[in-house]
Image (cartoon, rainbow, N blue to C red):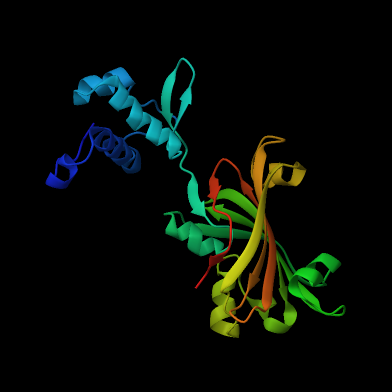
Amino acid sequence: MHMPTSSTQIRLPMYFRILQAILENIQSGRIKPGEPLPSEADLGQQYRVSRITAKRALDELVHQGRAFRQQGRGTFVAQARIREISGFRSFSEDIRARGFVPGSKILKFEQVEAEAAVREHLHLLEDEHVFLLKRLRLASDEPVAVETAYVPCRLCPGLLQEDLARGSLYQILMEKYQVVPTWADAEIEAIRAGREETSLLKLNSGQPLLAARRVTYSANYDAIETVYSVYRGDRFTFYTGRQYIG
């Protein structure tokens, strides 16, 4: 296993140097998801450190979600998680920032009369209509989320003509309609996959999911979108609270 040996690295604690060496091998593909990592004894012998130091490096990998342990078998490389997804910003931007290629499949895209809950979230009048956009969200062609968004028709009257299987909704709102998503409030909960999620996300029945309900606002507190997103719980980590988009 290659270990960096620059003057900066030499000053780092040994457990951290071992950690970086393992991460380099994971990121380069030399060690793939599901493959075993060296044992504490092997790392101790390779780097001439105590088993406590080697264990600390492996513990940190597990803490970061980059590895997992199986009782009696050892430590293994975990499937890469899409970490630090806020639940508040553009899905495309978030996914791209994490090194994945964003994609979408349109499940439903139409103009509908707003239901009571949607009217409340978006502060709409009773006779106002919204665009309903339901998409299967992809990260490097892997289905990772189902997202149902509602946007007031008055903000973007020609939205149905846009190719939202490829384009970013937020980018279109900003560039074509001068509607700028600026901040959002969201709440997140754990749920179990139902029949639709199981099929679309290729999961086992009852597998845990993360569900985010979000309302997105412009800088002057106008509600411009409400969205309900269901994410694969094994691929996402969320931060909660209010976050600014711009």
Q: Quadrant of residue 42?
A: top left
Q: Is residue 68 above or below residue 116?
A: above
Q: Quadrant of residue 45?
A: top left
Find residue 174 and report its horizontal and vertical position in percent: 55, 79
Whether residue 32 is visible, yes or no, is: no
Instruction: Between residue 108 and residue 176, name the one nearer to us.
Output: 176
176 relative position to 14: left or right: right
Find residue 122 and report its horizontal and vertical position in percent: 74, 73
194 relative position to 23: left or right: right
Q: Is residue 142 above or below residue 68?
A: below
| Name of the residue lying farthest toward the left | 7
Q: Is residue 32 above or below residue 244?
A: above
| Name of the residue lying farthest toward the top | 72
Instruction: Between residue 65 and residue 133, name the one nearer to us.
Output: 65
Residue at 34% of width from left, 39% of height from top? 29
Q: Is residue 13 above or below residue 246?
A: above
- Give the quarter of the figure containing the N terminus: top left
Q: Quadrant of residue 18?
A: top left
Find residue 41 and report its horizontal and vertical position in percent: 29, 17
Whether residue 239 is visible, yes or no, is: yes
Residue at 40% of width from left, 28% of height from top? 35
Find residue 69 and report its horizontal and vertical position in percent: 46, 25
- Total numbered labels placed on residues in the image: 0
Residue at 63% of width from left, 59% of height from top? 105
